[in-house]
Image (spheres, rainbow, N blue to C red):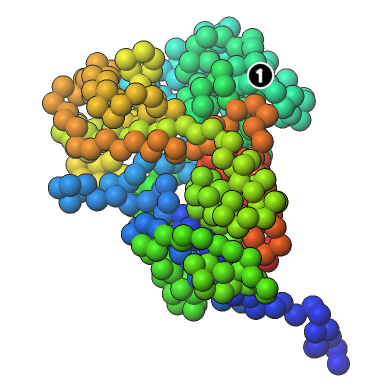
Amino acid sequence: MGGRYRPIWLESVALKVAIIGGGWAGLAAAVEATRAGHAVTVLEAARTLGGRARRVVADDGLVLDNGQHILIGAYRATLALMRELGVDLDTALLRLPLALRFPDGRGLSVPASLRPPLDLLAGIAGAQGWSLRDKFSLVRISLRWRARGFRCAPGDSVAALCAGLTPRVMDELIAPLCVSALNVPVERASGAVFLRVLYDALFAERGGADLLLPRVDLGALLPDPAARWLGAHGASVRIGQRVQAIAPATAGWTVDGESFDHVLLAAPAWESARLARGASLPQAVAWAEQADALGHEAIATVYLRGTPGLPGAPLRALRHGPGAPAQFVFDRGALGGPAGLAALVVSASEGTRESIEAQALAQARAQLGWHGAVPVQTIVEKRATFACTPGVQRPGIPIVPGLMACGDYVEGPYPATLEGAVLSGQAAAAAL
């Protein structure tokens, strides 16, 4: 028979699966589960797919995003999924070598022509405005991280991890990288997770640290292609349908009374906790308590109109501190958006929307000379990411038989990133 037949117990069993949440994790899980032959239904409470990385339409009809996101070359799972969904990466994303340059030209750029770690060493050697002491301190600490296998004690913060770096290196490299990747200041950020991000981006592969800047809105980047793919492959996507309750049944689970074999919670941590707790099973309640115990950090994006653009690149780092909350500015006009549109990103943001907008506008005028800029819209995601602090306990993917969870907050090696969301969704779907 030449191996043409497989034992029946090796054949996959088609399951009826409900995925609650249509963000990047839920959509990644839906594609993976549909590919495996399961009957998938995605239920999304909002009218727009994408979760915390979605398209937003301003009051005047201008298409924006709910936050300015960056992908990097090390996002292998996310980029592979986008290709599978038919996204032309060269058109949708602008790839640039890692550069943390300030408006005055100071800062570090990593050349694309060299392999790790030579590219980083070359970037350090050519860092503008850095003294020999600055450069040597970063080389010495980087070699220490590498010698230790990019591992540290679970309770170490990024600040403790970087003891010995000069203030300039901390201010112009470590602090911007940390807050952009973990959305937590260095004093409160997990050193272990930061080291994993640094390894994958700067040391694991050539181009891993490349910045991939979206040239299309976030809906067109993944949620829209995923919805089209799922529809073409027989899955059901229901938007504007908030699930009220899930419950275990004699065989499988019910979702608002509808029967399914398995349920995958792909909503934000607090919403998934609400549903899990309502199942009234001890393990599910314990999982919900762990999810509810997570802290969260805000991210604000201040959109400005009437800006003259950025010289040389569509992204610049900003000097932030008291009264200057933004860490980065993006020239949206150079990324395919309307000319004169810019986005200032305030990670780990604090204060009211009005105060953040006023301070970011003053910062743009002071650091960029954008005296004619006016605010278009300021979007604040109050619970944009979980607080990736030292020793944080994240809930796992399995909850109870037939019930699982996915999202950028579940247990895993990465902070709250698009790559973390996609990987968790794929892992949960594979566990079916």
The relative height of residue 150 versus residue 13 in the rendered view (above or below) is above
Q: Give the total number of marks visible in the rendering.
A: 1
Q: Position of residue 44 (x, y in %)?
A: 43, 60
Q: Which quadrant would the N terminus be assigned to in this image? A: bottom right
- At a point 63% along the width and 65% down the height, the residue shown is 248
Mark 1, Cα crowd under 10 Å, few <14 / some 14-19 / many 20+, is many
Mark 1 sits on what residue? 161
- At a point 51% along the width and 27% down the height, the residue shown is 184
Q: Position of residue 321 (x, y in %)?
A: 39, 15
Q: What's the residue type where badge 1 is placed? A: Leu
Q: Position of residue 223 (x, y in %)?
A: 42, 59
Image quadrant where residue 427 sits = bottom right
- At a point 49% along the width and 67% down the height, the residue shown is 256
Image quadrant where residue 158 sits = top right
- At a point 46% along the width and 64% down the height, the residue shown is 43
Per the image, label 1 sits on a secondary structure element best described as: helix
The relative height of residue 207 versus residue 280 in the rendered view (above or below) is above
* Nearer to us in this view, 428 or 144: 428
Judge left or right: residue 263 versus residue 321. Answer: right
Image quadrant where residue 319 sits = top left
Judge left or right: residue 242 versus residue 304. Answer: right
Q: Is residue 52 visible?
A: yes
* Nearer to us in this view, 248 or 330: 248
